Amino acid sequence: MGAIATVWQHAIELLLPSRCVGCGAGGTYLCDACLGRARRAGPLAFDPAARAFDEVTAPLAYEGAARTAVLRLKYAGLRAIAPSMARPMAEALSSASVRADVVVPVPLHPSRLRQRGFNQALLLARPIAEAVGLPVRDDLLRRLVAGTPQVDAGSIDERRANVAGAFGLAPGADAAGLRVVLVDDVLTTGSTLDAAAGTLKRGGARSVHALAFAREQ
Ligand SMILES: [Zn+2]
């Protein structure tokens, strides 16, 4: 879908009555009942020594209405659903008492951004930042490699090698001393968030808290 098509689709979305992607209830894109029923992601077992991020939060399991919400946002261009998805993310961030200075969305490669017309992580990051009173910094990180890294298989070392070099700091960007909340839509293996967090850390970031809407389990 081209950028112009997504602009039109977004305009049409705003004219049509909203419907919950989980149950079809009117007046919202993801209703409180569906969010309340959604299974919470269990505690995440990861080896902190093997990850560049310091903590990770993903409130929901990637299934049911949560999965439908992600797919509609990313692949059907339903941008208006992003604030409803951001709400449980902001709540999880607040309950985790995360100390942070900035909210950084995981960037898309420019070619993917042109193709999709928007960065879903940025659409999530904006309302999260507003809810927790922090600035969004989408000018720090750049995605250098197009395409999804093949991270489904292999050891941690192999997965990291796959995404190494996937991100870089933007020219002139300064992450020194920043405590970052790094936002993405779905946490799968964690390799993408790990690579982005590693780039921020090498740029001097003091801490990186990874935050995703849902986690594959
Ligand atoms: Zn619903």
Image (cartoon, helix red, strand yellow):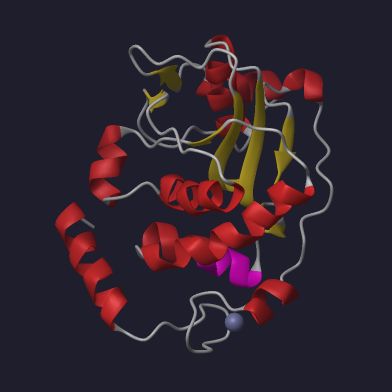
Q: Residue at x 74, y 33 (%)?
A: 55
Q: Residue at x 67, y 33 (%)?
A: 209
Q: Residue furthest left?
A: 4
The quadrant in which the N terminus is found is bottom left
Location of residue 203 in the rendering, given as x and y in whole percent from the top left corner = 52, 11
Location of residue 121 in the rendering, given as x and y in whole percent from the top left corner = 46, 46
Position above or below: 26 against 108: below
Picture quarter containing residue 89? bottom right
Q: Residue furthest front?
A: 133
Picture quarter containing residue 139? top left
Picture quarter containing residue 60? bottom right
Location of residue 99 in the rendering, given as x and y in whole percent from the top left corner = 71, 33
Residue 189 is one of the magenta-drawn residues: no
Q: How many marks?
A: 0
Q: Which residues are magenta?
A: 64-69
In the figure, is residue 50 to the left or right of 154?
right
Location of residue 124 in the rendering, given as x and y in whole percent from the top left corner = 49, 52
Q: Residue at x 80, y 42 (%)?
A: 44
